Image (cartoon, helix red, strand yellow):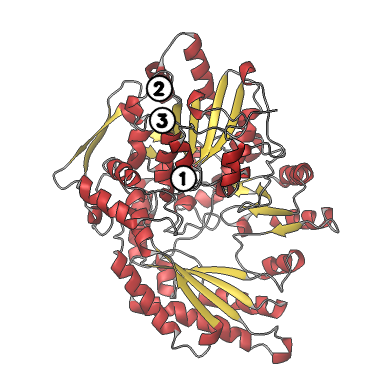
Amino acid sequence: MRKLALNDEILLSIQQPARYIGGEFNMVQKDPDKVDIRFAMCFPDVYEIGMSHLGIQILYSMFNDREDIYCERVYSPWMDLDPIMREQNIPLFTLETQEPVKNFDFLGITLQYEMCYTNVLQVLELSQIPLHACERGENDPIVIGGGPCAYNPEPLADFFDLFYIGEGETVYFELMDHYKENRTAGGGRQRFLELAAEIPGIYVPAFYDVTYHEDGTICSFTPNNPHAGETITKQLVVDMDSVGYIEKPLVPYIKVTQDRVVLEIQRGCIRGCRFCQAGDVYRPLREHSLEYLKHYAYDMLKSTGHDEISLSSLSSSDYSQLEGLVNFLIEEFKGKGVNISLPSLRIDAFSLDVMSKVQDIKKSSLTFAPEAGSQRLRDVINKGLTEEVILNGARQAFEAGWNRVKLYFMLGLPTETVEDMEGIALLSEKVAETYYEIPKEQRHGKVQVTASSSFFVPKPFTPFQWARMCTKEEFLERANIVRGKFRQMLNFKSLKYNWHEAELTVLEGILARGDRRVGAVIEAAYKNGAIYDSWSEYFNNDAWMKAFEDCGVPIDFYTTRERSLDEVFPWDFIDAGVSKEFLKREWKRAMEAVVTPNCRGKCSACGALKFGGGVCFETRETTEGTGL
């Protein structure tokens, strides 16, 4: 029996004790004394969110397949346990062995979204690991950051020993082997970091110096250690079937956000939406084979007992074998009570046919993501979706029995006008009107159209990385314009409109495009009480505003300031595959509202061809005339 890190009195006093006891079905158990490396894998949010993260499940399975590595999990303690651990000096512990994280060789932290940054500091502090990498000694874990936000690691540079840029299945084992060899040779922390810096995709912040112009923009970013390269190139899996997946996913005791088997069908996206960071940094699109997916779908459902499987990707409709996969799942699990979830679909006749087979139409709603209210603005963002396609998809859905639709939009996009904003209400009204064009006897009650708008955040490695961002007041003014237009619609009672928090969005924008100077603000905000910032009930904007003021860091510099095309960005030292020249071309095309074809339609010479696989090589004919 494992001895739990928290006693019965504490466990009985908190909301969800199962967040901290481990022992879940399919949890890996090893003898810590018989492994060479202990790796604590952290998702810096509450257990229910972290357990739903596919990347950690993949790495957990991958690491533990090696006999010499024991990978364990740790999540951010919730707000009820956090003060207890501080008061009673209980160090943060892993779920598998219930041992303190500070005793491990590595602490790997997934950076999935910017609003988890204060939770990163919570994890370090509760683990009793010095916050700053420069203050850590030989007995402290090596702290690694990875995930989407690692594509601009600079706001967190002071807190991490190294960052892993790219997909985890590529060079992690090489990093682990270097660690073992260095330790056997009697090398210390500094020597290991130098060895790590020589591995493609590994970035050691301490090995680089930054200088600034008088206007605050970056003047230079240069290595200060001979082992560090001038450019860090992202690492990716070229042949998706060459790496293993999750044979036995962890099954939690409590309900988590994604309480189902998740099957990743492909990585990357062909669409090229100009606001989408994932669509750029995960290029090129690479698919799993149908046989690979059949094998893992069967094994994961069998090993977990889950009654739902979700087909995961950025754009599931673009998976070339989707029809074959869905038909296999329907036939294989017919009568066995297994539901199939299909997120990220483009609504067309095939998709609707599939969903009508696998969903309860009466209970489910369909989701469309027009992103913008007018065709002009959809062309600016390269959405590749016309009003005709949207309304035709809605009509087919209504005729098939659906009567609830969700529409997702963004406010504050580059070049946005009042006409574009009001177009959100007008398009929602047209969707409702489409329902009432169906003969009354064929309808299923009243229609409900829910429109939601998030606020636009410019992200690194997108054509919009040069864009100005709105202020909080501007965001709210735009939301009020849209709300006012909704009230004028004839079908107002069938329409619903809501929007995201503006203050949170502004902060996300600062952290997304921030440099090293923002790190002091993150630390100050954390010490002011900021934590769980992505949770609206705990978001403390005052703590952040005081931090900016006390640190003398101007908010407008990172948000509303216009950026020139020749400005050096904090992330320019990273080669994510898409070239800066391509992004500049796309930025200019956006300003002209010119659409760029998707990757299967025509190669746009983004730079991802150099990786040697995926959609770039499905047919070399797509590259003719591009100069590649």
Foreground residue, 549 or 383? 549
The answer to whether residue 40 is left or right of residue 576 is: right
The answer to whether residue 557 is left or right of residue 523 is: left
Say few, some or many: other residues with alpha carbon within 10 Å of mark 1 (under 14 / 14 to 19 / 20 or more).
many
* Residue at far top of view: 185
Task: Examine the rendered structure and indicate whether residue 590 appears above or below residue 519.
Answer: below
Q: Circle 3 is placed at which residue position?
A: 162
- Sequence order check, earlier mark of 3 and 1: 1
Q: Circle 2 is placed at which residue position?
A: 193
The percent position of residue 336, horizontal first and vertical second, equals: 84, 55
Marks counted in the figure total: 3
The percent position of residue 276, horizontal first and vertical second, equals: 45, 56
Residue shown at 72%/46% (left/top)?
293
* Kind of residue at disc 2: Leu
* Kind of residue at disc 3: Leu
Disc 1 to disc 2, how far (Cα)? 22 Å
